[in-house]
Image: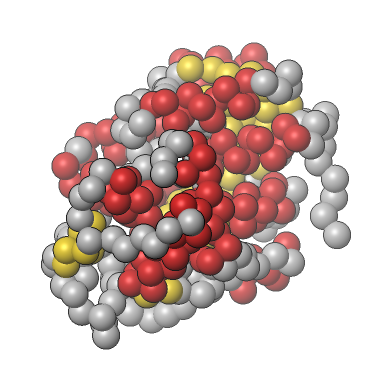
Amino acid sequence: MRRPFNQEYTYLITGAAGFIGFFLAKRLLENGCKVVGIDNVNDYYDVNLKNARLEKLISFENFTFIDGDISDKEMVLNTFIEHKPNIVINLAAQAGVRYSIENPDVYIQSNIIGFFNILEACRFHPVDHLIYASSSSVYGSNKKVPFEESDFVDHPVSLYAATKKSNELMAHTYSHLYKIPSTGLRFFTVYGPMGRPDMAYFGFTDKYFNGESIKIFNNGDFENDLYRDFTYIDDIVEGIVRLIDHPPVDDVPSAVFNIGNNNPEKLMVFIGTLEKCLSKSLNREVVFDKVFEPIKPGDVPATYASTDLLQKAVGFKPKTSIEEGLQQFTDWYVDYYNVK
């Protein structure tokens, strides 16, 4: 059984206005914890959605918000000095595989320099546990599935993946040199209500209501369709929460875990389920107009997480079905955007 939340601790969450950061902060705040959130609220996607998340967090008296960028080293160090966090969860990052091809600079700034600043702050102001976001993209085009944490991950196929692999190497080095207990989390295609509009399921829904076709990057090859390990947001948060009080204690206190659904779905099955869930939310039939195109550079054919290490460490395995998770998303979408 999980130990209760430590209400004496201060939890620092970077990327607090982001999808995972918001739900994690909300979970901690609902359990009486003190949370300091950092976010630069950039316009990579709809700022209104980020502000809507922030409004919910600010309603908690135990929440402190800092409007800042983790690539600003002085701001990061001052935050550690002032708030003395016990636990740090670094979720601030420039996300997106395809966007990294168009805008490489922001990935180096946020994912490399920003994470370096977090590590430096933990070096000079020790914490009980540093948890940071990695990504399933580090597995690149590995053919062996399911992906295991011990797999070879030295061939990333996007700059985004390369920055996440770099984060794991940087954390390992700092853990070795300065005994910072650190845990990297390789997230697998996270989805759910209040999610990221740049993700396919959200974009497909937007396009439907805009009367546009959806683009599916699988060449229309249903036999060899793309597979994704879609992981519902509540399962992601539960995994993080359980790992918070399980810092690694080896000679090099550094660990990496997959957090995925361990049940990959064909992209077309996922899209069909999204149509059914949206139909139920609207009480009428929904069918997307589909256009099939070649797979994009940086995309990988399949993601499939082994969650054995996570289950062994904290007794948890993500289990929310796409039917359940997508229904939660479409119900939220219809209500939030007031569409019919």
Q: Is residue 299 visible?
A: yes
In-image side of 41 versus 313 (left or right): left
How many labels sit on residues?
Answer: 0
With 299 as the anchor, is 177 left or right in this view?
Answer: right
Residue at the spot 36% in from the left edge and 65% down from the top edge: 271
Q: Residue furthest front?
A: 284
Q: Is residue 308 above or below residue 238?
A: below
Quadrant location, the N terminus: bottom right
Q: Name the side, left or right, on which 228 lies relative to 155.
A: right
Q: Residue at x 55, y 38 (%)?
A: 21
Q: Is residue 165 visible?
A: no
Q: Nearer the viewer, residue 43 or 339?
A: 339
**Outermost residue to the bottom:** 223
Residue at image coords 57%, 22%:
55
Q: Nearer the viewer, residue 101 or 31?
A: 31
Snapshot colouring: secondary structure
**Image location of residue 287, percent across then percent down:** 32, 63
The location of residue 279, given as percent across then percent down, is: 44, 59
> Considering only vertical position in the picture, is 253 above or below 28?
below
Percent of width and height locating residue 242: 71, 53
- Image quarter in which the C terminus is found: top left
Residue 222 lies, in percent from the top left, at: 26, 80
- Residue visible at 35% across and 38% down in the picture: 94
